[in-house]
Structure formats: structure tokens, C-alpha cells
Image (tube, grey):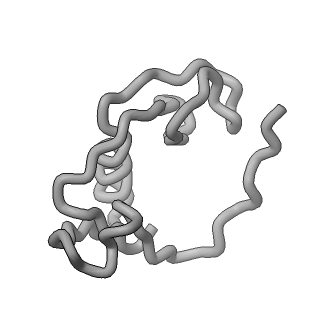
């Protein structure tokens, strides 16, 4: 990810796979590697850490801005892979 924009104060509980670095809002098992996920009180903060660690930029956006309806948005460096098929 090249740039991640986060609405100031945005937080969302979710899940994280520490093996594949997959992040989601729910799920007990990672759809990429099949390992168990762990719960996170703020998956948006976890996402920001991953983006920064991979050399991307994290930008916090004030409320009432273009991001107000979404909480997060991203400018991608590459086309994303196809979504995993969930059973």
C-alpha cells in the first residue's frame, strides 16, 4: 500500500493473523494461511502499523473531510490479488 488515509479518531475492533498479516473485521481462521486469528481492539491501528512497516505513508484526515463516510481509504501501489474464497 502506498498511502493509507485514516479518519481522525477512527477505531474498529477486528482480527489479525500474525503469520500472514491478514486483517479483517471478523473470522476465527485466516483465509490465507489457515492459522487462527487473534482479536484486536483496533484493527485500523494494526493496519496503520503494517502500512508503515512496509514503507507506506499513513495520513490522518480531519472529520468532515472526504473520508467521513468510510473511516479508511488507500492508494495502492499494485493491483490487489483476488479475494480469497470463504467457505
Quadrant containing the C terminus is top right
Q: Quadrant of residue 33?
A: top right
**Residue farthest bottom in this picture:** 66
Residue 50: x %, y % from top left:
37, 50
Q: Residue at x 60, y 21 (%)?
A: 28
Question: Is residue 39 toward the left or the right of residue 26 in the image?
Answer: left
Residue 7: x %, y % from top left:
25, 64
Q: Residue at x 73, y 54 (%)?
A: 83
Quadrant containing the N terminus is bottom left
Question: Is residue 11 toward the left or the right of residue 24 in the image?
Answer: left
Q: Residue at x 33, y 73 (%)?
A: 67
Q: Quadrant of residue 80?
A: bottom right
As rendered, which of 69 and 7 lies closer to the eye? Answer: 69
Residue 64: x %, y % from top left:
21, 75
Task: State whether residue 8 is above or below residue 20.
Answer: below
Residue 57: x %, y % from top left:
28, 69
As rendered, which of 14 and 55 lies closer to the eye? Answer: 14
Q: Residue at x 37, y 49 (%)?
A: 47
Question: Is residue 31 toward the left or the right of residue 14 in the image?
Answer: right
As rendered, which of 62 and 75 lies closer to the eye? Answer: 62
As rendered, which of 34 and 83 lies closer to the eye? Answer: 83
Q: Looking at the image, how many numbered discs can be counted on the residues? A: 0
Amino acid at each position: 500500500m502506498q498511502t493509507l488515509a485514516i479518519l481522525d479518531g477512527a477505531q474498529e475492533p477486528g482480527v489479525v493473523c500474525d503469520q500472514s498479516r491478514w486483517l479483517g473485521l471478523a473470522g476465527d481462521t485466516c483465509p490465507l494461511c489457515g492459522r487462527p486469528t487473534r482479536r484486536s481492539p483496533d484493527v485500523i491501528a494494526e493496519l496503520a502499523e503494517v502500512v508503515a512497516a512496509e514503507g507506506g505513508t499513513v495520513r490522518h484526515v480531519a472529520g468532515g473531510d472526504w473520508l467521513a463516510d468510510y473511516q479508511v481509504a488507500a492508494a495502492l501501489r499494485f493491483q490487489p490479488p483476488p479475494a480469497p474464497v470463504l467457505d
